[in-house]
Amino acid sequence: MALLTPLFAFLYHLPQVYKWLLKPYYVASLFMSVAFLAVRKTPGVCDHLSTQREDGNPCDFDWREVEILMFLSAIVMMKNRRAITVEQHVGNIILFSKVANVILFFRLDIRMGLLYLTLCIVFLMTCKPPLYMGPEYIKYFSDKTIDDELERDSRVTWIVEFFANWSPECQSFASVYADLSLKYNCTGLKFGKVDIGRYGEVSKKYKVSTSPLSKQLPSLVLFQGGKEVMRRPQVDKKGRAVSWSFTEENIIREFNLNELYQKSKKLNKSKGDKDNLSQFPPVPEEEEPGTAEESESKKDK
């Protein structure tokens, strides 16, 4: 059963996986991920490689190479246990496949190792994973607009994601956050994002670290009346982020989105009633019969 669940999940997302894999970033990443396999198994190339196999076959893995691949496969499985999207699963496989290739190429020939490592660095600097471009109800803030927008209406609750475009975790979380905005966005509950990799002053003010080693990206912060109410992941007294999984279920539970949404719907209804009343002129009060007769007699006099 433990093997069938991920298999069914993969088959369910297979059309989406194919769509991602056809993008240039993933096509190039896949070629780099299988580079050592291609070199070791290609006839005419593998014949000139060194090997530690007892049978002297240079076109097959030796025991040390198998050991390295199995060890890194175990790491991928452990990392994927915390992955929340298919992008993260694919990204972990690609990342650790490249790490394995670097180790294997250096072990095979230091010149090949240096060449492959150089290609990885150039690829990292020039190619970025494709950004999420799907539907969403999210307002993007800058350093000049975030404070004004949060404080504009004290009745509006904001959930703001602090992110950086270079962070793989933020890129993987983008589709999850977009889905939440489509389900829960309304007049009284809004979703926002601010790129603290671009606006450094915002990261300092709201105390979200942008260090490459930081575990605070992404960070979700709930604001009510312009003031922070809660955030995930939490930060301890030493400034370290407490590990937290950004799954849709965790966010709905921790931020009480269902309850917030119901309260926001009531706010929408009350606003709608006020708007409707303002559209119609006030109805004049009817005078009592006696009062009307007295007013007429006064006019006659």
Image (cartoon, helix red, strand yellow):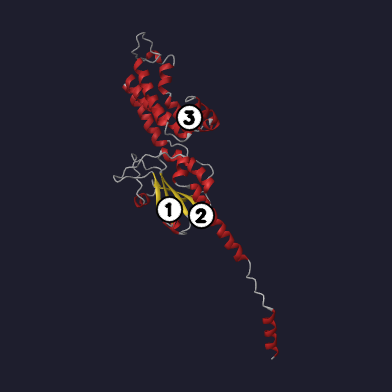
* Mark linked to residue 47: none
Q: Circle 1 — which element?
A: strand
Q: In this view, does 278 lie above or below 264?
A: below
The amino acid at mark 2 is Gly
Quadrant that contains the C terminus: bottom right
Mark closer to the chain start, 3 or 1:
3
* Image position, residue 169 (x, y; %): 42, 38
Q: Is residue 242 left or right of residue 259?
A: left
The amino acid at mark 1 is Phe
Cβ–Cβ below 8 Å for labels 1 and 2? no
Q: Which residue is drawn at 63% across and 67% down?
A: 280
The residue tagged 1 is 223
Q: What separation in Å lies between label 1 and label 2 (alpha carbons)?
A: 12 Å
* Image position, residue 115 (x, y; %): 35, 26
Q: Please name whichever residue, 11 or 276, is drawn nearer the observer in this view of the structure.
A: 276
The residue tagged 3 is 27
The residue tagged 2 is 188
Q: Circle 2 — which element?
A: loop
Q: Please name whichever residue, 281 or 98, is drawn nearer the observer in this view of the structure.
A: 281
